[in-house]
C-alpha cells in the first residue's frame, strides 16, 4: 500500500489525474500480470489492462474505502473485464500459452524447474475459473485471504474453501500426470 494511499484516492476521486497516476504506477504491473495469466497474450493483456484503468478512472467516484487495499477494487474491475473479454470472444482460458521465462543456464535443475512450471500451469488450466482466480491472487499476486475475498466479492471462508479445493485438485492432477 502506498504511503497515504487513502489521501491519494480521495484526491483521485476529486478528479486529480496526478493522484490517479500514482495509483496507476503502483498497481499497473500486478493488474497486468493478473490479466496476462488469464488471457496469455501480451497485446490483449496490455489492452485489457488499459481498459481496467480507464474504467477505474471513469468510475473512481464509486470507490468506497472499506479497509481493503485499492488493488482489491482494481482486481474486481479486472476480473469483470476478463469475463467480458471471454464472453465476447467465446474462447476458453489458455494458461499453457504463457511465455516461459528465458533461461541462459540450462543446468538439470533449471530444466526440472521449467518442466515443473509447465506441469503446474497445465494443472491450473484444468481448474474452474473461480479456483484459477483464487490461486493466481493468493500465490502469484500474494494477496491475503481478506484481500482475495474482497477482490472476488466472496466471503473469506469461501476463498479458503476454494483455495483448499484448488490445491487439492492441482495435487490430484499432478499425481495423475506422474
Image (tube, helix red, strand yellow):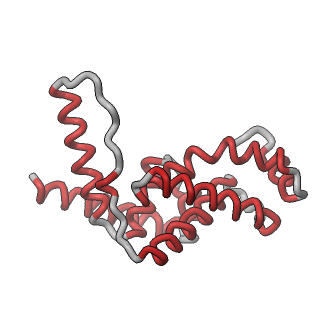
Is residue 127 positioned above or below 10 on the image? below
Q: Residue at x 42, y 69 (%)?
A: 130
Q: Is residue 74 above or below residue 83?
A: above
Which is nearer the eye, 147 or 129? Answer: 129
The residue at the point 40 percent across, 69 percent down is 129
- The front one of 59 and 146 is 59
Task: Name the residue furthest left.
Answer: 178
Camera-nearest residue between 59 and 171: 59
Vertical order, 25 against 6 (above or below):
above
- Residue under the image location 85 percent in, 59 percent down: 13
Question: Which quadrant would residue 4 be assigned to in this image?
Answer: top right
Residue lying at 46% horizontally and 53% vertically, measured from the top left: 36
**In which quadrant of the rendered image does the N terminus lie?**
top right
* Residue 47 as seen in the image, left or right of residue 162: right
What x and y, as percent, mark residue 6?
80, 50
Residue 133 in the image, given as x and y percentages of width and height: 44, 62
Amino acid at each position: 500500500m502506498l504511503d497515504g494511499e487513502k489521501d491519494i484516492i480521495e484526491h483521485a476521486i476529486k478528479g486529480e489525474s496526478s493522484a490517479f497516476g500514482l495509483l496507476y504506477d503502483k498497481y499497473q504491473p500486478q493488474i497486468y500480470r493478473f490479466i496476462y495469466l488469464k488471457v496469455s497474450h501480451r497485446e490483449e493483456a496490455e489492452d485489457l489492462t488499459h481498459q481496467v484503468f480507464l474504467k477505474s478512472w471513469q468510475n473512481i467516484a464509486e470507490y468506497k474505502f472499506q479497509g481493503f487495499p485499492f488493488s482489491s477494487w482494481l482486481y474486481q474491475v479486472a476480473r469483470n473485464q476478463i469475463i467480458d473479454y471471454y464472453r465476447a470472444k467465446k474462447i476458453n482460458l489458455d494458461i499453457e500459452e504463457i511465455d516461459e521465462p528465458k533461461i541462459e543456464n540450462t543446468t538439470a535443475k533449471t530444466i526440472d524447474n521449467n518442466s515443473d512450471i509447465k506441469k503446474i500451469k497445465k494443472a491450473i488450466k484444468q481448474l474452474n475459473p473461480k479456483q484459477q482466480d483464487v490461486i493466481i491472487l493468493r500465490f502469484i499476486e500474494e494477496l491475503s485471504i481478506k484481500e482475495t475475498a474482497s477482490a472476488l466479492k466472496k466471503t473469506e471462508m469461501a476463498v479458503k474453501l476454494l483455495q483448499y479445493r484448488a490445491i487439492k485438485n492441482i495435487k490430484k492432477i499432478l499425481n495423475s500426470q506422474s
